[in-house]
Protein backbone atom coordinates (compact mmCIF):
# COMPACT_ATOMS: atom_id res chain seq x y z
CA UNK A 1 0.00 0.00 0.00
CA UNK A 2 1.13 3.53 -0.64
CA UNK A 3 3.02 5.33 2.10
CA UNK A 4 0.26 7.88 2.72
CA UNK A 5 -2.42 9.70 0.83
CA UNK A 6 -0.16 11.48 -1.64
CA UNK A 7 1.44 8.24 -2.78
CA UNK A 8 -1.72 6.16 -3.15
CA UNK A 9 -2.58 5.32 -6.71
CA UNK A 10 -6.21 4.51 -7.27
CA UNK A 11 -8.00 3.37 -10.26
CA UNK A 12 -11.16 2.63 -11.36
CA UNK A 13 -14.62 2.59 -12.70
CA UNK A 14 -17.04 0.58 -14.63
CA UNK A 15 -19.74 -1.73 -13.40
CA UNK A 16 -18.62 -5.01 -11.90
CA UNK A 17 -20.02 -8.36 -12.90
CA UNK A 18 -21.93 -8.80 -9.67
CA UNK A 19 -21.47 -12.56 -10.11
CA UNK A 20 -20.54 -13.09 -6.46
CA UNK A 21 -22.70 -12.50 -3.43
CA UNK A 22 -21.72 -9.57 -1.27
CA UNK A 23 -20.16 -10.89 1.89
CA UNK A 24 -21.83 -8.30 4.09
CA UNK A 25 -20.76 -5.55 6.42
CA UNK A 26 -20.07 -7.98 9.25
CA UNK A 27 -17.56 -10.18 7.45
CA UNK A 28 -14.80 -9.25 9.88
CA UNK A 29 -16.98 -10.08 12.85
CA UNK A 30 -20.08 -8.82 14.53
CA UNK A 31 -21.19 -6.38 17.17
CA UNK A 32 -17.77 -4.80 17.60
CA UNK A 33 -16.41 -7.87 19.44
CA UNK A 34 -13.85 -10.42 18.37
CA UNK A 35 -15.71 -13.35 16.89
CA UNK A 36 -15.87 -16.27 19.28
CA UNK A 37 -14.60 -14.16 22.17
CA UNK A 38 -16.34 -12.28 24.96
CA UNK A 39 -16.16 -8.50 24.98
CA UNK A 40 -13.43 -8.59 27.63
CA UNK A 41 -11.14 -10.76 25.56
CA UNK A 42 -7.49 -9.97 26.09
CA UNK A 43 -4.85 -9.73 23.37
CA UNK A 44 -3.52 -13.25 23.94
CA UNK A 45 -7.01 -14.72 23.64
CA UNK A 46 -7.62 -12.73 20.48
CA UNK A 47 -4.55 -14.30 18.91
CA UNK A 48 -5.29 -17.87 19.88
CA UNK A 49 -9.07 -18.22 19.78
CA UNK A 50 -10.58 -20.76 17.42
CA UNK A 51 -12.07 -19.22 14.28
CA UNK A 52 -15.83 -18.88 14.50
CA UNK A 53 -16.29 -19.56 10.81
CA UNK A 54 -14.58 -19.87 7.46
CA UNK A 55 -13.20 -17.14 5.30
CA UNK A 56 -13.33 -13.53 6.35
CA UNK A 57 -15.75 -14.37 9.14
CA UNK A 58 -12.89 -16.09 10.96
CA UNK A 59 -11.11 -12.75 11.45
CA UNK A 60 -11.58 -10.52 14.50
CA UNK A 61 -13.22 -7.14 14.36
CA UNK A 62 -11.49 -4.80 14.27
CA UNK A 63 -8.78 -6.79 12.50
CA UNK A 64 -5.15 -5.74 12.94
CA UNK A 65 -3.40 -5.71 9.57
CA UNK A 66 0.39 -5.63 9.53
CA UNK A 67 1.20 -2.90 7.00
CA UNK A 68 4.00 -4.30 4.82
CA UNK A 69 4.64 -6.59 7.78
CA UNK A 70 5.94 -4.99 10.96
CA UNK A 71 7.43 -2.04 9.10
CA UNK A 72 7.63 0.02 12.27
CA UNK A 73 10.44 -2.28 13.39
CA UNK A 74 12.00 -3.90 10.30
CA UNK A 75 12.57 -2.85 6.67
CA UNK A 76 9.23 -3.27 4.92
CA UNK A 77 8.28 -6.12 2.61
CA UNK A 78 10.87 -8.56 3.89
CA UNK A 79 10.35 -11.92 5.53
CA UNK A 80 11.89 -10.39 8.64
CA UNK A 81 9.05 -7.84 8.65
CA UNK A 82 6.34 -10.37 7.78
CA UNK A 83 7.41 -12.86 10.44
CA UNK A 84 7.61 -10.20 13.12
CA UNK A 85 4.10 -8.98 12.28
CA UNK A 86 2.79 -12.46 13.04
CA UNK A 87 4.90 -12.67 16.21
CA UNK A 88 3.35 -9.38 17.35
CA UNK A 89 -0.20 -10.66 16.84
CA UNK A 90 -1.26 -9.30 13.45
CA UNK A 91 -4.40 -10.99 12.15
CA UNK A 92 -3.45 -10.27 8.54
CA UNK A 93 -0.13 -9.38 6.89
CA UNK A 94 0.06 -7.08 3.88
CA UNK A 95 2.48 -9.24 1.94
CA UNK A 96 2.98 -7.47 -0.33
CA UNK A 97 2.77 -4.63 -2.84
CA UNK A 98 3.12 -6.52 -6.11
CA UNK A 99 5.27 -5.24 -8.99
CA UNK A 100 6.77 -7.22 -11.90
CA UNK A 101 10.30 -7.96 -12.97
CA UNK A 102 11.57 -7.73 -16.53
CA UNK A 103 11.06 -11.46 -16.94
CA UNK A 104 7.52 -11.41 -15.58
CA UNK A 105 7.87 -12.47 -11.94
CA UNK A 106 5.90 -10.69 -9.22
CA UNK A 107 7.96 -9.28 -6.35
CA UNK A 108 7.05 -7.41 -3.17
CA UNK A 109 8.13 -3.76 -3.13
CA UNK A 110 6.39 -0.58 -2.04
CA UNK A 111 6.91 0.88 -5.51
CA UNK A 112 8.55 -0.24 -8.76
CA UNK A 113 11.27 2.33 -8.02
CA UNK A 114 13.62 0.57 -5.60
CA UNK A 115 16.31 3.17 -4.92
CA UNK A 116 14.79 3.95 -1.53
CA UNK A 117 14.03 0.40 -0.40
CA UNK A 118 17.11 -1.56 -1.53
CA UNK A 119 20.88 -1.17 -1.74
CA UNK A 120 20.78 -0.98 -5.54
CA UNK A 121 22.64 2.36 -5.53
CA UNK A 122 25.68 0.64 -4.04
CA UNK A 123 25.85 -1.90 -6.89
CA UNK A 124 28.12 -0.44 -9.60
CA UNK A 125 27.02 -3.13 -12.04
CA UNK A 126 23.55 -1.55 -12.06
CA UNK A 127 24.59 2.10 -12.24
CA UNK A 128 23.49 2.34 -15.87
CA UNK A 129 19.98 1.16 -14.98
CA UNK A 130 19.22 4.43 -13.21
CA UNK A 131 16.69 6.32 -15.27
CA UNK A 132 13.72 8.68 -15.18
CA UNK A 133 10.21 7.41 -15.90
CA UNK A 134 6.70 8.75 -15.66
CA UNK A 135 4.59 6.50 -13.45
CA UNK A 136 0.92 7.45 -13.19
CA UNK A 137 1.74 10.94 -14.39
CA UNK A 138 4.57 11.48 -11.92
CA UNK A 139 8.17 11.81 -13.09
CA UNK A 140 10.39 9.57 -10.96
CA UNK A 141 14.15 8.98 -11.13
CA UNK A 142 15.74 5.79 -9.88
CA UNK A 143 15.91 2.07 -10.53
CA UNK A 144 12.77 0.15 -11.53
CA UNK A 145 11.89 -3.49 -11.02
CA UNK A 146 10.73 -3.88 -14.61
CA UNK A 147 14.30 -3.22 -15.78
CA UNK A 148 15.73 -6.14 -13.77
CA UNK A 149 15.42 -9.89 -14.06
CA UNK A 150 14.45 -11.75 -10.93
CA UNK A 151 17.96 -13.18 -10.67
CA UNK A 152 19.39 -9.65 -10.69
CA UNK A 153 16.93 -8.41 -8.06
CA UNK A 154 17.86 -11.31 -5.82
CA UNK A 155 21.40 -9.90 -5.57
CA UNK A 156 19.98 -6.80 -3.83
CA UNK A 157 19.09 -6.41 -0.17
CA UNK A 158 16.34 -4.40 1.49
CA UNK A 159 16.96 -1.19 3.46
CA UNK A 160 14.78 1.03 5.65
CA UNK A 161 12.65 3.39 3.53
CA UNK A 162 12.18 6.24 6.07
CA UNK A 163 15.37 6.28 8.20
CA UNK A 164 14.66 9.76 9.58
CA UNK A 165 11.59 8.39 11.33
CA UNK A 166 12.98 4.92 12.01
CA UNK A 167 16.73 5.12 12.53
CA UNK A 168 16.61 1.93 14.62
CA UNK A 169 15.41 0.00 11.55
CA UNK A 170 18.64 0.76 9.71
CA UNK A 171 20.28 -1.82 11.99
CA UNK A 172 18.69 -4.42 9.71
CA UNK A 173 19.72 -2.90 6.39
CA UNK A 174 21.14 -5.54 4.07
CA UNK A 175 19.82 -8.53 6.01
CA UNK A 176 16.92 -9.62 3.76
CA UNK A 177 16.40 -10.00 0.02
CA UNK A 178 13.34 -9.05 -2.03
CA UNK A 179 10.63 -11.71 -1.74
CA UNK A 180 8.59 -12.93 -4.68
CA UNK A 181 4.84 -13.36 -4.44
CA UNK A 182 5.26 -17.09 -5.01
CA UNK A 183 7.67 -17.24 -2.07
CA UNK A 184 5.08 -15.37 0.02
CA UNK A 185 2.41 -17.94 -0.84
CA UNK A 186 4.75 -20.75 0.24
CA UNK A 187 5.70 -18.82 3.38
CA UNK A 188 2.02 -18.39 4.20
CA UNK A 189 1.50 -22.17 4.15
CA UNK A 190 4.66 -22.78 6.18
CA UNK A 191 3.69 -20.24 8.82
CA UNK A 192 0.14 -21.60 9.00
CA UNK A 193 1.52 -25.06 9.78
CA UNK A 194 4.15 -23.73 12.18
CA UNK A 195 1.79 -21.49 14.16
CA UNK A 196 -1.22 -23.80 14.16
CA UNK A 197 -3.58 -21.09 12.86
CA UNK A 198 -4.45 -19.73 9.46
CA UNK A 199 -2.14 -16.95 8.30
CA UNK A 200 -3.87 -14.32 6.16
CA UNK A 201 -2.26 -12.06 3.57
CA UNK A 202 -3.50 -8.87 1.88
CA UNK A 203 -1.50 -8.21 -1.32
CA UNK A 204 -1.97 -5.18 -3.57
CA UNK A 205 -1.64 -4.77 -7.32
CA UNK A 206 0.55 -1.68 -7.78
CA UNK A 207 0.11 0.68 -10.74
CA UNK A 208 -1.78 -1.88 -12.85
CA UNK A 209 -2.52 0.52 -15.71
CA UNK A 210 1.15 1.48 -15.95
CA UNK A 211 2.32 -2.13 -16.04
CA UNK A 212 -0.42 -3.21 -18.43
CA UNK A 213 0.95 -0.60 -20.82
CA UNK A 214 4.37 -2.27 -20.57
CA UNK A 215 2.95 -5.68 -21.41
CA UNK A 216 3.38 -6.81 -17.80
CA UNK A 217 -0.25 -7.14 -16.68
CA UNK A 218 -0.53 -7.93 -12.99
CA UNK A 219 -3.97 -9.47 -12.57
CA UNK A 220 -3.42 -12.53 -14.74
CA UNK A 221 -0.12 -13.24 -13.01
CA UNK A 222 -1.72 -12.92 -9.57
CA UNK A 223 -4.61 -15.19 -10.54
CA UNK A 224 -2.28 -17.81 -12.02
CA UNK A 225 -0.27 -18.07 -8.80
CA UNK A 226 -3.37 -18.14 -6.61
CA UNK A 227 -4.79 -20.99 -8.69
CA UNK A 228 -1.47 -22.84 -8.55
CA UNK A 229 -1.53 -22.79 -4.74
CA UNK A 230 -5.28 -23.35 -4.38
CA UNK A 231 -5.91 -19.87 -2.98
CA UNK A 232 -8.36 -18.45 -5.50
CA UNK A 233 -11.64 -19.14 -3.68
CA UNK A 234 -14.14 -17.09 -1.70
CA UNK A 235 -12.87 -18.51 1.59
CA UNK A 236 -9.20 -18.36 0.63
CA UNK A 237 -7.01 -16.51 3.17
CA UNK A 238 -5.90 -13.96 0.56
CA UNK A 239 -7.58 -10.55 0.29
CA UNK A 240 -6.70 -8.63 -2.87
CA UNK A 241 -6.60 -4.83 -3.01
CA UNK A 242 -5.84 -2.07 -5.50
CA UNK A 243 -6.14 1.69 -5.85
CA UNK A 244 -7.40 1.11 -9.37
CA UNK A 245 -11.01 -0.17 -9.41
CA UNK A 246 -10.60 -1.59 -12.90
CA UNK A 247 -7.87 -3.86 -11.53
CA UNK A 248 -10.31 -5.13 -8.91
CA UNK A 249 -12.96 -5.58 -11.61
CA UNK A 250 -10.54 -7.64 -13.66
CA UNK A 251 -9.60 -9.74 -10.62
CA UNK A 252 -13.32 -10.24 -9.95
CA UNK A 253 -13.51 -12.00 -13.31
CA UNK A 254 -10.45 -14.15 -12.67
CA UNK A 255 -10.70 -15.30 -9.02
CA UNK A 256 -13.25 -15.54 -6.21
CA UNK A 257 -11.06 -13.98 -3.50
CA UNK A 258 -12.34 -11.16 -1.29
CA UNK A 259 -11.61 -7.88 -3.08
CA UNK A 260 -11.04 -4.36 -1.74
CA UNK A 261 -10.86 -0.99 -3.51
CA UNK A 262 -8.31 1.36 -1.94
CA UNK A 263 -9.23 5.04 -1.72
CA UNK A 264 -6.88 7.98 -1.37
CA UNK A 265 -7.73 11.60 -0.53
CA UNK A 266 -11.19 12.83 -1.51
CA UNK A 267 -9.90 15.17 -4.23
CA UNK A 268 -7.66 12.56 -5.89
CA UNK A 269 -8.51 10.58 -9.02
CA UNK A 270 -7.75 6.90 -9.52
CA UNK A 271 -5.19 6.72 -12.29
CA UNK A 272 -7.35 4.53 -14.50
CA UNK A 273 -9.95 7.31 -14.31
CA UNK A 274 -7.29 9.69 -15.58
CA UNK A 275 -6.43 7.34 -18.45
CA UNK A 276 -10.12 6.85 -19.31
CA UNK A 277 -10.90 10.59 -19.07
CA UNK A 278 -13.33 9.84 -16.29
CA UNK A 279 -13.70 13.10 -14.34
CA UNK A 280 -14.80 11.47 -11.09
CA UNK A 281 -12.73 11.73 -7.93
CA UNK A 282 -12.61 9.64 -4.77
CA UNK A 283 -15.25 12.00 -3.38
CA UNK A 284 -17.62 10.59 -6.00
CA UNK A 285 -16.72 7.01 -5.12
CA UNK A 286 -17.62 7.44 -1.45
CA UNK A 287 -21.12 8.74 -2.13
CA UNK A 288 -23.96 6.23 -1.62
CA UNK A 289 -24.12 5.82 -5.41
CA UNK A 290 -20.37 5.26 -5.72
CA UNK A 291 -20.34 2.78 -2.87
CA UNK A 292 -23.21 0.81 -4.42
CA UNK A 293 -21.19 0.57 -7.62
CA UNK A 294 -18.14 -0.70 -5.76
CA UNK A 295 -20.32 -3.25 -3.94
CA UNK A 296 -21.17 -4.74 -7.34
CA UNK A 297 -17.65 -6.14 -7.75
CA UNK A 298 -15.84 -5.87 -4.40
CA UNK A 299 -16.41 -6.75 -0.76
CA UNK A 300 -14.69 -3.81 0.87
CA UNK A 301 -12.93 -0.48 0.68
CA UNK A 302 -9.60 0.60 2.11
CA UNK A 303 -9.94 4.36 2.66
CA UNK A 304 -7.35 6.69 4.06
CA UNK A 305 -8.05 7.43 7.73
CA UNK A 306 -8.84 11.02 6.78
CA UNK A 307 -11.92 9.79 4.93
CA UNK A 308 -13.13 8.30 8.22
CA UNK A 309 -12.32 11.31 10.41
CA UNK A 310 -11.07 14.44 8.62
CA UNK A 311 -8.47 16.75 10.16
CA UNK A 312 -8.67 20.51 10.50
CA UNK A 313 -6.04 23.00 9.36
CA UNK A 314 -4.02 22.28 12.51
CA UNK A 315 -3.98 18.55 11.93
CA UNK A 316 -6.48 17.78 14.68
CA UNK A 317 -9.35 15.35 14.25
CA UNK A 318 -12.80 16.74 13.56
CA UNK A 319 -16.18 15.01 13.35
CA UNK A 320 -16.36 11.52 11.77
CA UNK A 321 -17.95 11.30 8.34
CA UNK A 322 -20.80 8.94 7.49
CA UNK A 323 -18.52 6.73 5.39
CA UNK A 324 -18.51 3.77 7.81
CA UNK A 325 -22.30 3.68 8.03
CA UNK A 326 -22.74 4.32 4.31
CA UNK A 327 -20.33 1.52 3.35
CA UNK A 328 -21.85 -0.94 5.81
CA UNK A 329 -25.30 -0.12 4.45
CA UNK A 330 -24.33 -1.56 1.05
CA UNK A 331 -22.46 -4.52 2.53
CA UNK A 332 -18.88 -3.24 2.27
CA UNK A 333 -16.23 -3.67 4.96
CA UNK A 334 -13.78 -0.86 5.75
CA UNK A 335 -10.08 -1.39 6.50
CA UNK A 336 -8.52 2.10 6.52
CA UNK A 337 -4.81 2.96 6.50
CA UNK A 338 -2.32 3.65 8.09
CA UNK A 339 -1.77 3.84 11.86
CA UNK A 340 1.82 4.50 12.93
CA UNK A 341 3.29 5.24 16.35
CA UNK A 342 5.61 8.12 15.39
CA UNK A 343 4.53 11.71 15.96
CA UNK A 344 4.60 12.93 12.33
CA UNK A 345 2.09 10.27 11.30
CA UNK A 346 -0.40 10.81 14.14
CA UNK A 347 -3.21 13.38 14.31
CA UNK A 348 -1.98 16.48 16.14
CA UNK A 349 -4.24 15.61 19.09
CA UNK A 350 -2.10 12.57 19.86
CA UNK A 351 1.45 13.83 19.31
CA UNK A 352 3.98 14.12 22.12
CA UNK A 353 6.81 16.49 21.34
CA UNK A 354 8.15 17.07 17.86
CA UNK A 355 10.85 14.41 17.39
CA UNK A 356 10.54 12.79 13.97
CA UNK A 357 11.21 9.37 15.48
CA UNK A 358 9.40 10.02 18.77
CA UNK A 359 6.26 8.12 19.76
CA UNK A 360 3.05 9.97 20.52
CA UNK A 361 -0.17 8.47 21.90
CA UNK A 362 -1.21 5.91 19.28
CA UNK A 363 -3.47 4.16 21.81
CA UNK A 364 -5.68 7.23 21.93
CA UNK A 365 -5.74 7.45 18.16
CA UNK A 366 -6.57 3.75 17.76
CA UNK A 367 -9.40 4.10 20.27
CA UNK A 368 -10.86 7.05 18.38
CA UNK A 369 -10.80 5.26 15.03
CA UNK A 370 -12.09 1.97 16.46
CA UNK A 371 -15.09 3.85 17.90
CA UNK A 372 -16.26 4.68 14.36
CA UNK A 373 -17.05 1.00 13.70
CA UNK A 374 -14.28 0.21 11.21
CA UNK A 375 -13.74 -3.48 10.46
CA UNK A 376 -9.95 -3.36 10.64
CA UNK A 377 -6.96 -1.08 10.27
CA UNK A 378 -3.55 -1.17 8.65
CA UNK A 379 -0.74 -0.43 11.07
CA UNK A 380 3.06 -0.47 11.01
CA UNK A 381 2.98 -1.47 14.70
CA UNK A 382 0.86 -4.59 15.09
CA UNK A 383 1.67 -5.02 18.78
CA UNK A 384 0.34 -1.54 19.55
CA UNK A 385 -2.78 -2.29 17.52
CA UNK A 386 -3.43 -5.59 19.29
CA UNK A 387 -3.13 -3.97 22.72
CA UNK A 388 -5.31 -1.03 21.66
CA UNK A 389 -7.97 -3.42 20.42
CA UNK A 390 -7.94 -5.35 23.70
CA UNK A 391 -8.37 -2.08 25.59
CA UNK A 392 -11.22 -1.03 23.31
CA UNK A 393 -13.11 -4.32 23.57
CA UNK A 394 -12.70 -4.42 27.36
CA UNK A 395 -14.41 -1.06 27.88
Image (spheres, grey):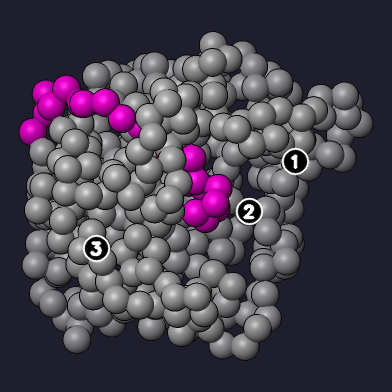
Q: What is the x, y in percent for residue 12?
A: 35, 32
Cα distance between the residues tagged 1 and 2: 14 Å
Q: Is residue 136 left or right of residue 381?
A: right
Tell me the distance, in whole angstroms, between the alpha carbons under discs 1 and 3: 35 Å
Above or below residue 89? Residue 302 is: above
Magenta highlight: main SS: loop
Residue at 47%, 24% in the rendered image? 275
Q: Which mark is residue 75?
A: 2
Answer with mark 3 or mark 2, whichever residue precedes in sequence: 2
Instruction: Give me the disc on residue 115.
Output: 1
Between 57 and 10, the one nearer to me in the picture: 10
Residue hosting label 3: 374
Residue 58 within the segment the image draws in magenta? no
How many marks the image carries: the answer is 3
Judged from the image, the secondary structure of the residue bearing numbered disc 1 is: loop
Q: Quadrant of residue 358?
A: bottom right
| Residue 236 visible | no
Between 90 and 193, the residue placed more toward the observer is: 90
**Residue occupying the point 44% across, 75% down:** 312
Crowding around mark 2 (Cα neighbors within 10 Å: few <14, some 14 to 19, many 20+) is many
Q: Secondary structure at mark 3?
A: loop
Q: Which label sits in the foreground, 3 or 2?
A: 3
Q: Secondary structure at mark 2?
A: loop
Amino acid sequence: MGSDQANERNQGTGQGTGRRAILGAAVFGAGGAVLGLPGTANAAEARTAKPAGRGLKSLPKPAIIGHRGASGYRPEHTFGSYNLALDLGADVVEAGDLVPTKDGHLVCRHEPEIGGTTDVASHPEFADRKTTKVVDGVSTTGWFTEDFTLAELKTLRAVERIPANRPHNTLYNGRWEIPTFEEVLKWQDEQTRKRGKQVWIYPETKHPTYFRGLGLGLEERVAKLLRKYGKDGRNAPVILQSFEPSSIQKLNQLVDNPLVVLLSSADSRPYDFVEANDPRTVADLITPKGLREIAGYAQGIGPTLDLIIPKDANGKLTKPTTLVADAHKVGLILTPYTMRNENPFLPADFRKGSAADGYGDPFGAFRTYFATGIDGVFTDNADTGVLARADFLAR
